[in-house]
Image (tube, rainbow, N blue to C red):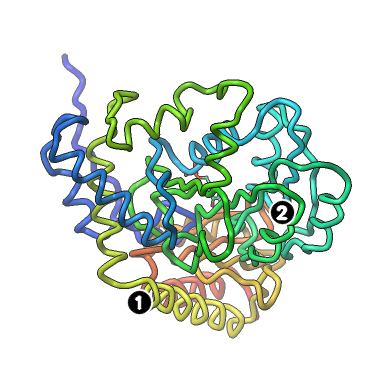
Amino acid sequence: MKRHYGDLKPGTRVLLGPGPSDADPRVLRAMVTPVVGHLDPDFLATMDEVQELLRYVYQTENELTFTVPGTGMAGMETCLANLVEPGDRVVVCINGAFGLRMAEIAGRYGAEVVRVEGTWGQVINPAKVKEALAQGQTKLVAIVHVETSTGVIQPIEEIADLAHEHGALLLADTVTSLGGTEVAIDRWGIDASYSGSQKCLGCPPGLSPITFGPRAVAALENRKTPVTSWYFDLSLLRRYWSSERFYHHTAPISLVYAMREALRLVYEEGLEERFRRHREAGEALQTGLQEMGLKLFAQEGHRAPMLTTVLIPEGIDDLKVRRRLLDEYSVEIGGGLGEMKGRLWRIGLMGHSCQRRNVALFLAALQRILQEEGFRG
Ligand SMILES: *Cc1c(COP(=O)(O)O)cnc(C)c1O
């Protein structure tokens, strides 16, 4: 007897976790566009459009702006692999799980890692970065824009200025922020950044947009040692994304189609309108949670609109509530990460998931479940 493998039929979810977010049906349709070769002139034109649209969302003129195959972590790895050489002093700002990962990866590429630690749930104090910069010649300052483990949005400009005053580059993780709130690469002086397809850009996971400005490109070109990773070596990748069209890897064609469509949606909506949509939905969610008697985790005034963190009330079973949301309402949210595991919920309103009706659905569902679980707010 041959074993029967049934059709794929995952539940129809409303994705309100820390990513992936729901993809607009237009993005999913783009993925069934026939696959052509990765050097087909029609595909090359698509790549050019993806670059143009990425420059629009990143608000940059940077030539070196394209997608790297792989998820957000591939972007993190790419940026650090290319900007760090053994022995470089790298200041990493850590106030959450993703800052920790940057420190870990920089260390693996041979950096002398200097940690600027901040409290989880609070922003990084620029004075601490300044202090770290004053203590030694630094190659790179790395910081997370929206720390998805805590829900904090970090002001970047002042820290970018400090880095430059000390002759260092600024690397910003914009995985959760890009497409949901302003990321002004050129105006803020961010030298290098990476993002992810599946958060506020509203595309399935698998691509990581990156951008390198003139100073970061100079650092890349002036390396004394080749980049240790061949696959993520930007000096090779940029030759595929430039007019040379050097074969480096077979582009994930269907994902690039999806990215183009997701970016086209951002462009049609307009950045200002898109940011306003995220801001208003985030505020409605945060107000609703507080009205229910729950406590938000992230520092007031620095709460990210697209990722809200709320403390799990005493006596309430984290897993049981999340399981009930999924089983009874088909709503996915995230639990805590790293040192916040079991202590908070993370609710994402990203990209196509960021809709007022999802806020209403989630608040009503949570209120009902919490009441039934014995919470008295
Ligand atoms: C999600 C996320 C990443 C990692 O992205 P993956 O797509 O999971 O690899 C990195 N940084 C931040 C801030 C994130 O939110």
Mark 1 vs mark 2, foreground winner is: 2
User: x and y percent of residue 1 in the render?
Assistant: 16, 14
- Residue 301 pos. (x, y %): 66, 78
Indicate which disc residue 163 carries: 2
How many marks are shown on the rendered structure?
Answer: 2
Q: Which mark is residue 159?
A: none
In the rendered structure, the answer to whether residue 92 lies left or right of residue 245 reads right
Q: CA distance from mark 1 to mark 2?
A: 42 Å
For the point 56% across and 83% down, the residue is 287
Q: Is residue 152 above or below residue 68?
A: below
User: How many other residues sit within 10 Å of disc 1, few (<14), some (14-19) or many (≥20)?
Assistant: few
Q: Name which of mark 1 and mark 2 comes first in the sequence.
A: 2
Q: Is residue 126 left or right of residue 301?
A: right
**Cβ(mark 1) to ligand 1 < 8 Å?**
no
Q: In what element is the residue under mark 2?
A: helix
Which residue is label 1 attached to? Answer: 357
Q: Amino acid at mark 2?
A: Ala
CB within 8 Å, label 1 to label 2: no
Determine which quarter of the picture holds residue 26.
bottom left
Q: At x 86% / y 51%, what residue is drawn?
A: 134
